[in-house]
Amino acid sequence: MAQILAPSAQWQMRMTKSSTDANPLTSKMWSSVVLKQNKRLAVKSSAKFRVFALQSDSGTVNRVEQLLNLDVTPYTDKIIAEYIWIGGSGIDMRSKSRTISKPVKHASELPKWNYDGSSTGQAPGEDSEVILYPQAIFKDPFRGGNNILVICDAYTPAGEPIPTNKRHKAAQIFSDSKVVSEVPWFGIEQEYTLLQQNVKWPLGWPVGGYPGPQGPYYCGAGADKSFGRDISDAHYKACLYAGINISGTNGEVMPGQWEFQVGPSVGIEAGDHIWCARYILERITEQAGVVLSLDPKPIEGDWNGAGCHTNYSTLSMREEGGFEVIKKAILNLSLRHKEHISAYGEGNERRLTGKHETASIDKFSWGVANRGASIRVGRDTEKQGKGYLEDRRPASNMDPYVVTGLLAETTILWEPTLEAEALAAQKLALNV
C-alpha cells in the first residue's frame, strides 16, 4: 500500500551503487534534517555561511521536503492561489498558480486569469486564449497558511462560456427564482478506483490476476480486504481542512475501490465542492504514486462498477406531504430519462446493465429501498411521508454541474404535457 505520508518518490534519497540493500531513513532520521545548529557538524571557516550535505550509509538526504513545508506567513502577506479548471475532456482537471498580494475571503476579490486553450483541447492554436473566472475558493491543504484553491470556469475573451463550461448553465438554473425558493439539497456519493501506477490494475490486486470474489471488501478492514485506506483517510482530512462539505467515506464492494460523500450542499455549491474534492484526490494520489480512475466500469466481468449516486430533495419534498412531491418529481424524471442518461457520464452503458446494484440503462424504474432501480426512495422517506430521492444512474465520471442542474430543471422548472404525464403515471404504476 502506498505510503502517502512519506516524502514523494522523486525526492527520496538516492541509493548508492554499493549499498542497494540499505534500509531507507527512518522517520526519526528524516525529521533530524530540519535546520538546526549541531555542534558536531560545526567546522571552522572564514566564510559567513556554509552548506553541508548530510551523509548517510544510503546516500544524501534531499532537503526539498523541508522547503515544501516552509511557512512563509510570518514573512509576507502574499499568498499562492491555485487556479483550477476542467479540461477539454470534461473530466480532466488542470491548474496553475499565481501570487496574490494579500489573503482573500471571496472569489470576487480575485483577478481573472487566462490559459492556453489549444493545449487543453479547448481552443484553436490561432486563437488560444481562454479566460478563467474565479467562482469558489477553498483553503489549500497542500501549501497551508492563507494559500487557497480556486475553482474557476472558462470563457472566451468576449465573455461567452466555452462548450466545456457546464457550470455556467447550472448557475443560471440555480439562480432562477423558482429554484431558489425550493432550496435544492444535494448529497453526492463519489465512487472511485485506485490503480497501480505502472500496470493500471486495481490497487491490492495481483498483477495480471484477480483477488477473491466480492463480498468481504465492502467496508472491510484488514490487509487482505482493504487497499488504499491511507489515501482515503488523507483525502478525508484534506477535504475537511479545505472547507469542503465532506460527510463520510467507506471502502466499496470491489477491492481497490472507495467512496466519499459530499453534502448536503445547496445548489451550485454541490458541483463546486465535488470538483474541488476530486482535485484534492488527484493531488494525493499523485503524491502516493497511485492512479485515480473515475471509469464507471474499470474491470469488466462480475465486478461492481463505479457510480456517483446523487441524493436530492427540495423544500417541498422535505415538508409535510413531501412524498407526493417526490412522486411527481419521479414522474418528470421518467419522461426525461434519455436526456438524463445522455448527460450522466461517458461509458455508463457498461455499468448500467441491471446487475451489480444497477438498473438497466434502457428502462426507467423506481422503488422503495430498491438499489436495482433508477431512482431509490428510502424507507424513512416512505414512513415519514417526506424526505429525498436517490438518483442511482449517474456514473462516477459524471459532471456534477450537469447532473445537479438537470435534476433541478426537470423537477422544478420543467412541466410535461397532461397527456404525457398520464401515460407516464400508468407506466410507473406497473414498475412499483
Image: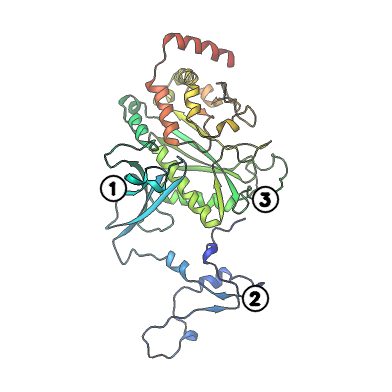
Which residue in the protein does label 2 denote?
A: 19
Which residue in the protein does label 1 denote?
A: 112
The local secondary structure at tag 2 comes to helix
Looking at this view, is 125 or 264 the one in front?
Answer: 125
How far is the residue under mark 2 from the one under mark 3?
34 Å
Name of the residue lying farthest toward the front: 126
**Badge 3 or badge 1: first in the primary sequence:** 1
At horizontal 51% and vertical 27% (from top left) the residue drawn is: 341
At horizontal 63% and vertical 75% (from top left) the residue drawn is: 17
Which residue in the protein does label 3 denote?
A: 222
At horizontal 33% and vertical 24% (from top left) the residue drawn is: 178
Looking at this view, is 374 or 145 the one in front?
Answer: 374
How far is the residue under mark 3 from the one under mark 1?
48 Å
Q: Where is residue 271 in the image (x, y as percent from the top left)?
A: 42, 38
Looking at this view, is 312 or 151 the one in front?
Answer: 151
Label 2 Cα neighbours within 10 Å, binned few <14 / some 14-19 / many ≥20: few
How far is the residue under mark 1 from the one under mark 2?
52 Å
Horizontal side of 144 relative to 378 (left or right) equals: left
Residue 130 seen anywhere in this rendered image of the structure: no
**Quarter of the figure that contains the N terminus:** bottom right
The amino acid on which the numbered mark 3 sits, given as a three-letter code, is Gly
Q: Is residue 260 above or below residue 9?
A: above
Label 1 Cα neighbours within 10 Å, binned few <14 / some 14-19 / many ≥20: some
Q: Which numbered disc, 2 or 3, marks the residue closer to the eye?
A: 2
At horizontal 49% and vertical 74% (from top left) the residue drawn is: 33
The local secondary structure at tag 3 comes to loop
Q: Where is residue 202 in the image (x, y as percent from the top left)?
A: 63, 47
